[in-house]
Image (spheres, rainbow, N blue to C red):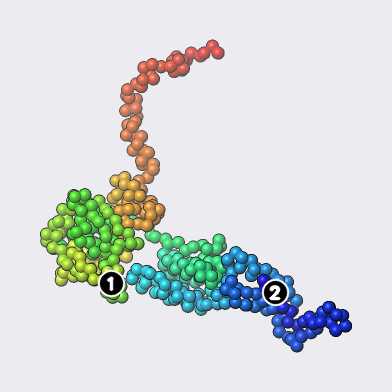
Amino acid sequence: MGHIQDRWWAEIPDPDLPGKNQRVKTDLHGRGLRYRVRYFDPAGTERSKSFPDRQKRLAEQFLISVENDKKQGTYLEPDAGKILFRDYAEEWLAGQSFKSTTRVNVPSRLRSQVYPFLGDLPLHAINPSKIRQWIRWMTDRRTAPSYRSVCFIHVSSILSAAVDDKRIRTNPCKAASITKPQPQPPKVVPWTDARVKAVLLALPHRAQITVPLGAACGLRQGEMFGLSPQDIDRRNNVLHVVRQIQQVNGKLIFCRPKREKSRTVPLSAGTLRRLDAHLEAFPAQQVTLPWNDVTGEPVTADLLMTDDCGQAYWRQAFNRDLWKPALQRAGMTTPERKDGTHALRHYYASVLLDSGESVKALSEYLGHADPGFTLRTYTHLLPSSHERARRALDARLGDADGLETASPSEDEHNPSSEARDARTGSRGTG
């Protein structure tokens, strides 16, 4: 149990009153902080904290809070939160087992959007007010909403780790007063059938398979590049999406699809015929790349899509030399970012939703984290409930003439007394 020491006064035996003590001034009287709280931390190390004159009550409250924290297991070392956010974040990064692509992106985001504002603050100085100011700072810099959202998630994860490590008591990012930045994805406007066909015809013959892989299978670009003929399940008419190609530090690697989430998508007969025609014209080529990291174990796969030299595609080169020129030849004189190969996935989603496919199934086919994300992205593409109601009513009742000429129901053949009375106008006697 701790105690409070008065450094200005001491008690010594009273020479005139045996067994009694008297208070006398110490050599420190009137100098420095008067009250010193002395206590032992959970590890048994003696610690202290001093308070000025006339603040004994604060010293007592501090001692009570320390003893309560020790009992509840929430005790924090006095200097635990003094570490700078930047230094703690670097420790946190060193302990993460990110995918190789994430290991490149997270430090870049911290350096550009977090360290300039929060990096030189000690952890204990980062409160909800600082977090709100940081979010506003990013907004004033015109940082994209989606980028702000990702950076907020990183900072919140770091501060949650600091709570777990007993550096700070609570995570300020989780305070009720914090409005978490939310990504604002632009409203998806799917390509028309005519545009999809125009882009298909505008692509070089070798690259045309991109369109059915995106528009009829919903693959991401990296998944297209990493697809192998061995991933085609002809017996069950499905496509197994098990790998993608990514770029890390200027090198290509194989890795699992986004969020480590392999999936299976339906394969139509027409798409299978296009895959077979492509393979007949451009046989699959063996490509060896490291797995999951530039230093990973080399893995060899037969790739369905390769360049003229039989090598795996680089994203930038494919987009610059093949995709963008094809868009321009298809009549899109000023292609935008939204017109990348990802537009084919949006087309795929719109076709399936229009045909009545469920959001849950579509989410699985697209490899989304959860159906809620799929619904938020494509909810405006769902058929209108008004239109569904009209179709349902017309299907059952037809038009007005059809309703009037409908066959009498069984009730009309055997009318109840109430129905007869209503038609004849008669009333009951009561």
Q: Tell me whether circle 1 and circle 2 mark residues in contact (CB < 8 Å).
A: no
In the foreground, 28 or 117: 28
As drawn, the label of residue 205 is none
Quadrant of res 277: bottom left
Residue that appears at 26% across and 63% down: 243
Q: Is residue 205 above or below residue 124?
A: above
Report the side of 95 relative to 340 (left or right).
Answer: right
Of circles 1 and 2, the one toward us is 2
Where in the figure is residue 353, as x and y percent of width and height? 32, 48
Question: Can residue 416 be seen?
Answer: yes
Report the side of 203 relative to 426 (left or right).
Answer: left
**Real-space CA distance between mark 1 and mark 2, rounded to the nearest whole angstrom:** 58 Å
Residue furthest front in the image? 18
As drawn, the label of residue 3 is 2
Where in the figure is residue 32, as x and y percent of width and height? 71, 84
Q: Secondary structure at mark 1?
A: loop
Residue that appears at 62% across and 77% down: 46
Residue at the disc numbered 1 = 296
